[in-house]
Image (cartoon, rainbow, N blue to C red):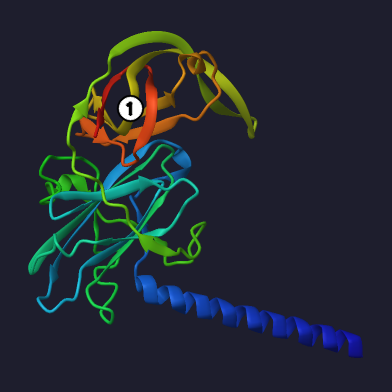
Amino acid sequence: MGRLAIATLGLFLFIAAFHRLNLLYSHKFFDVTGRAQWIWPQHRVAANVPVAFFATRDFDLPKNRYFTRIKLAGDPQYTLYFNGREVGGRRTADDMALDVYDVSTLARDGRNRIVVAVRSANGVGGLLASVDITPEYQNMVPSGSEWTIVRRWGNDLPLRDPPRIWRSSPMLLGRPPARRWNFLSARPGKFMRPAQRIVAARQVFRVHTALPVIDILGGVAVVGSRPMEAAVFDFGPVAGRLRLTNGFDGVTRAVKVRFANDRAEFQTIEGSVESFVFAPGERTIVDPQERRFRYAMVYGGNAAIDVVQ
């Protein structure tokens, strides 16, 4: 009986210590993001279809601010616009973090506007954001029910919301540590360089290849391939951000691209394939990630590409 009591007491102390530690880290992260919640469009995640949307928020900034810093995490890919300017973005992959952008030079007294484009090839992800203006006054405009989800792109979207038919309230996924994101460490966001020039492909040729696919058969994931034609764009050795032009602007659409430095790599189906998701109304999107490559292969060949430097 004594051993049982000791074991029970030990278990109780362990649970209490774990709970205390969790509260400590939860409070520490609350200081970082405050009431910000992970948000997403009203969408059936299990549908496994591509999603592209724009989370927007207009807000006022006071005059007596030390700085203006946007804290942002967008999974799996995001691009940040602030007051009409493209600021930064990235593909998060397994490298999740809270990116901090100091946009003090773009901020103005009174009305300001944040727009975050988020893209997911399988419809799964999340967006978390807030704004700091002094060391003491943090986590303004936290992502949550007051943000707006816009499902269609318009050229004036970085400046104003579209008609109500394209707007909706976000789905709230919870505060950190929510779902698979847990607690995120903050780090400086990487600003996008202004475009200096556009590089066109030296040549374009078509190949017969196969796209790696995963089918669910009887509840079991089976890896296979789907034969298809692709367009290969040869840029010569190049560095920059890929820009894709879409021929269909009425629906959400994912374009799959494979990068390579050796033409022989296209003869196999192995290798990573990136997805670029267009929202309705979008004719052009730019990859937030800078790359070095020679060839870019567009599966299906239904998008034209060049490189922004």
- Secondary structure under tag 1 reads strand
Instruction: Judge left or right: residue 7 versus residue 253.
Output: right
Q: Nearer the viewer, residue 56 or 162?
A: 56
Q: Is residue 78 visible?
A: no
Q: Nearer the viewer, residue 281 or 22?
A: 22
Q: Is residue 115 visible?
A: yes
Q: Quadrant of the C terminus?
A: top left
Q: Nearer the viewer, residue 24 or 163?
A: 24
Please report the residue visible at 52 percent of the width from the left and 80 percent of the height from the top.
24
- Counting other residues with Cα less than 10 Å from the Cα at mark 1, is it few (<14), some (14-19), or many (20 or more)? some
Amino acid type indicated by mark 1? Val
Q: Residue 127, relative to residue 123: is it above or below?
A: below
Please report the residue visible at 36 percent of the width from the left and 70 percent of the height from the top.
33
Q: How many marks?
A: 1
How far across and down, in percent of the image, does residue 192 sit? 25, 47
How far across and down, in percent of the image, does residue 8 sit? 80, 84
Please report the residue visible at 53 percent of the width from the left and 25 percent of the height from the top.
213
Occupied quadrant, residue 289: top left
Q: Quadrant of the N terminus?
A: bottom right
How far across and down, in percent of the image, does residue 282 sit? 21, 34
Occupied quadrant, residue 148: bottom left
Q: Which residue is mark 1?
A: 238
